[in-house]
Image: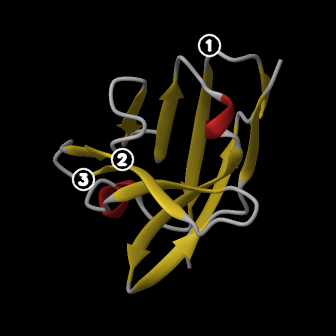
Amino acid sequence: QVQLVESGGGLVQPGGSLRLSCAASGISGSIFSFLAMGWYRQAPGNERELVARILSGGGTHYADSVKGRFTISRDNAKNTVYLQMSSLKPEDTAVYYCNTYWVRDYWGQGTQVTVSS
């Protein structure tokens, strides 16, 4: 059983930065290093959408809306994946979820990011 716990959300002004963290437990580090990890977000009234994904080998994929502003990374020694968010816009406001697939989909509880002046 994989548990994912997100942290780092909060209120930030437009143009600001935040770093989200997702700590995975319930699996060994050797298994975590083989997992693709993703960040998704869901704004009120919208469907959940993929923000960024990082593969076991370090390859990354980003939604067009965040390219050049967000960076996903991982620390396999800490079983943790990060999302560095810069140049934040009000439209980035959402609940951000961490995700992985290991036999089945696993989701964290989400962390709220609010971009507002």
Q: Is residue 24 left or right of residue 94?
A: left
Indicate the amino acid at tag 2. Answer: Ala
- Which residue matches tag 3? 55
- Quadrant in the rendering for residue 34: bottom left
Name which residue type carries label 3.
Answer: Leu
Q: Position of residue 78 (x, y in %)?
A: 48, 40
How crowded pointer 3 is (Cα within 10 Å; few <14, some 14-19, many 20+) is rated as: some
Identify the secondary structure beneath mark 2.
Answer: loop
Identity of the residue drawn at 74% across and 48% down = 111
Please tell me the numbered disc located at residue 15: 1
- Lower sequence index among marks 3 and 2: 3
Q: Are marks 1 and 3 in contact (CB under 8 Å)?
A: no
Residue 26 vs residue 19, the one in the foreground: 19
- Residue at (65%, 65%) from the top-left corner? 46
Task: Report the residue marked by disc 2.
Answer: 63
SS under mark 1: loop
Q: Is residue 14 left or right of residue 61?
A: right
68 relative position to 16: left or right: left
Instruction: Tell me if mark 1 has few (under 14), some (14-19) or many (20+) residues whose alpha carbon lies within 10 angstroms of its own.
Output: some
In the image: residue 54, left or right of residue 1: left
Q: Which of disc 3 and disc 1 is earlier in sequence? A: 1
User: x%, y% of residue 1?
Assistant: 56, 79
Which three-letter amino acid code belongs to the residue tagged 1? Gly
Q: CA distance from mark 1 to mark 2?
A: 19 Å
| Helix, strand or loop at mark 3 | loop
Residue 37 sits in quarter: bottom left
Residue 91 at x, y percent in the picture: 63, 38
Residue closest to the far top: 15
Image height of 7 relative to 109, above or below: above
Residues tagged 1 and 2 counted as in contact (Cβ below 8 A): no
Counting residues from the N terminus, which is met first, the one under dot 1 or under dot 2? 1
